[in-house]
Amino acid sequence: MERSRALPPPRRGPWILCLLPALAGGQLLAAGDAAYEERRVTGVRGRAVELSCGPATAAPPAVVFWSFAGGSGPPRAVAVGSGWQVAVASGAGTLGRVTLRNGTLELRELRAAAQGRFLCQGLFPEPGRLRVGYAAVLLRVLVPVSKPFVRPTAAAAAEGAAVALTCSVREGTEPLSFSWQHREPRGGPSASPAGLGGSGEELRLTPANRSHAGWYACTVGNEVNNHTSEPVYLDIVYGPDEPAISVEPFSPEAGGFSAGEREDVVLSCLAPSNPPSRYVWLHNGSQVHTGQTYVIAAIARAQAGTYTCLAENTHLQTRTQATIVLTVYYPPAGSPSCSAQATGDPQEVALWCRWPGGFPPARLRWVGPQEEEEEEEEEEGGMGTSFSMATSIQPGAATRNGSSFSCLASHPALPQGAACGTTLWVPAGGPSCTAAATKGDEYVMLRCRWEGGTPPVTLRWRDGGGRALGDPSPSAAVLVLSATDGLRGRDFVCAAAHPLRATGAECRLRLDVPELEAERSEVAVLEGSAGRLACRRGSGGGSLGASVVWHDPEGREVTPGVAKYQLERGETWVNLTVRDAEWPGDGGIYRCVAANAVGTASLPVRLRVDRYPAPPNVTISKLRYTRARTEVRLEWRTQGAGNLTGFVVQRRQAKKPPRRAPGPWETAAGDIEPHSRDRRLGGLDPTVVYAFRVLAVNHRTAGHPSEVQTPAEPPFEAYPAVTGAAVVGMLVATAASFLAVRWLAHHRDTLPRLHDLLFRTAGPGAQEPIGTPEDAETAASREEGAAAAAPGEPAAPGPAAEPLAEAPDAAADPPVNVTITVTATP
């Protein structure tokens, strides 16, 4: 039991009811005047409601007793109050949170169980008495509407089927009101689905169509509140509808669309469907793409044809399709070509304009130099217009040289169109004629050329009598003749004509043997030099392209690859160079021979090889060994006048032993400069005696060799040093000898034999023995020299003679003074 803070504990509640008589004690109860009141009150569950026991203007009751009768059972006590004392029954919590204040019963957090009849009994004090009051309050508890939810019979339905959506609430006091809202699938404001089957708790879509797809919500309300459900999506499956094909760029044609070649084409297909359609593109019945958009980059002519868009609803397994015809326009390849050709033998000019190919064919027409632009526009599409090829005939006599004509071309794939032009003109100069032999000189081909001009010049060959040979041709005319037809000396004429030229022109050609020309008929060179013989084919002979060769003095043809000769060949000339000309073998008559299809020509050229003049003679002025005898120093001088280009030194082994022939000369030094007069030669064998000679050379001519000489011995270069050493030695030896002789003279007994040998004087008849005739000649010359010596002068020193043997019985002579002279020999 709930009570206010001033109330006593709950166990005291029952006796409070007993206070009613006590409180009325001494007071009269006006039972007959009891007031009965009955009223209705509405409350909302969860909220608060107040139930008063009496009129609002009446004083609060002194004692009040509240009871509740919710059903068929007896009333139950709710609360009792007297002044500030209040007691709430323990079971009153099922009605809500109950409070009693001044007789007024307040129900907070009202519950649905509180709906029923509340009875109030109260004692109301009045002046002089207590009045008993009874009140019956019929409480109606309203339940707010809970959040509704929408439940469709199917989340997705095919178009044309029946679909129902039900809006349900868990609780809410009736009567309930229902309203529906519909929003499109891609958003937008919500709207009541007008014309849909009903506006109650069930919404019927019979039959459903694609406009019914979207979000659905319902709003439920009563007298307490209203509440809107969460939106529920209803999917309507439909389609695909018949596809619609669009083409960019948009170029409609009869029965389809068109595009220019190399243009980007975008094909788009739209077939409304849910779920979205799956698109497949077919080109001429073959699948080429999958997707809603098919982009053809730089479309080609082969991509023209029928394009089919196939739309498929994979959910419903339904298909639709649409087909268009795409035409691809493409211009002819390249650009229009203009040409002019002479006609009427030839008196007129035919202007040709061609631009074949393309789709559709290009429109062509010629425009003259005096036509105006307005006239060109008027003529377009008229008789002067043709497709792919246009021709215009212009009289040559009435056409000025240098006149220009234009061919205008138009095509749907070329917004700007195209054009070509030609200018009629006559080439300057005249025709040129040439002849050439073919197939091994079996045939002769005559060629006539006169290039340039529009139209080209018409050329035709004629013989010397004016008879036409072959057919006329523009710019060049060729005539082939057999070389066996006796063409030598015949004349041929090439006649030229042009429509814009009043008079014709011609060139003549005579077929004859080739003409040869030489720079010099005789060529002189010095031996060892190169002789150059030049031969050129002249302009005669009809330029038959004759082959030119050289023959040597023996009549042999000079061919490339021979070391002696060098050939230099041009188109009309051949030069022969004789290398390292020798005298007299390379001199003679060389022949330049040329042959063509009508004959042969020969031209002699003489080559004279001269020798160089003899160089001056040479004399050896010095030839001496070095000290090691492995080198010699050679000097020479020239005698007489003469040109020279160098010297050559030769050597060989000297004639030894006797009666043996000397060896061949070998070159010890060559290519010596002409201003040199000495040379140091090495590499000699010291044990061999060599002979040398020198020759002067003038290019290849050698002079008389010098005298043959053998090298002399080298001079003694150490003479001063040796002489000094000899003088010092002589002085030392003289002093030593003098001391020895003096000592020996005073000590005769020590070395008697040496004393006798040095100091004994020979007898008058003593003489030196003579062994050989040479000794006799030497002795005689010595005596003659001694007799010739002047008195008082010392005799010249001579070779020492052996001393004679001493006799055993010879007497000792007294000592004498002897002077010894020592000569040092190097």
Image (spheres, rainbow, N blue to C red):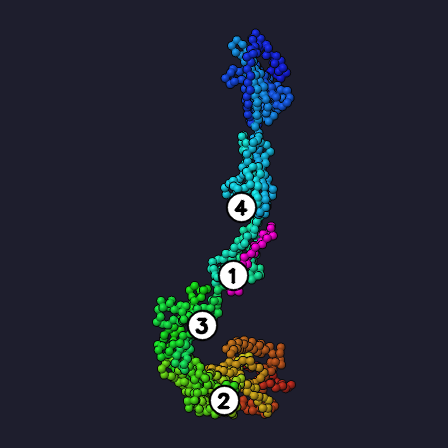
User: What range of the chain is rendered magenta?
Assistant: 301-326
Place of residue 505 in the rendered image (x, y in percent of width and height, measured from the top left): 38, 84
Residue 785: give its label.
none
Report the front residue among 475 and 577: 475
Instruction: State the SS at label 3.
Output: strand
Label 4, label 1: how far apart the Cα atoms are: 34 Å
Report the front residue among 806 and 510: 510
Looking at the image, residue 806 lies above or below residue 235: below
Q: Quadrant of the C terminus?
A: bottom right
Residue 757 can be seen, yes or no: yes
Q: Can you tell which of label 4 and label 1 is closer to the viewer?
A: 4
Say what amino acid the circle numbered 4 marks.
Ser
User: Of label 2 and label 3, which has the lower sequence position?
Assistant: 3
Looking at the image, residue 132 lies above or below residue 656: above
Of helix, strand and loop, which mostly describes the magenta segment?
Answer: strand
Whether residues under marks 1 and 3 lie with C-beta atoms below 8 angstroms apart, the answer is no
Instruction: State the SS at label 4.
Output: helix
User: Of label 4 and label 2, which has the lower sequence position?
Assistant: 4
Label 3, label 4: how far apart the Cα atoms are: 61 Å
Looking at the image, residue 200 lies above or below residue 322: above
Label 2, label 3: how far apart the Cα atoms are: 42 Å
Say what amino acid the circle numbered 2 marks.
Ser
- Give the residue drawn at x 51%, y 16%: 58
Residue 325: give its label.
1
Q: Is 367 left or right of 78, judged from the image as shown?
A: left
User: Of label 1 and label 3, which has the lower sequence position?
Assistant: 1
Report the front residue among 3 and 742: 3
Say what amino acid the circle numbered 1 marks.
Val
Label 4, label 2: how far apart the Cα atoms are: 98 Å
Q: Which residue is mark 4?
A: 211
Whether residues under marks 3 and 4 lie with C-beta atoms below 8 angstroms apart, the answer is no
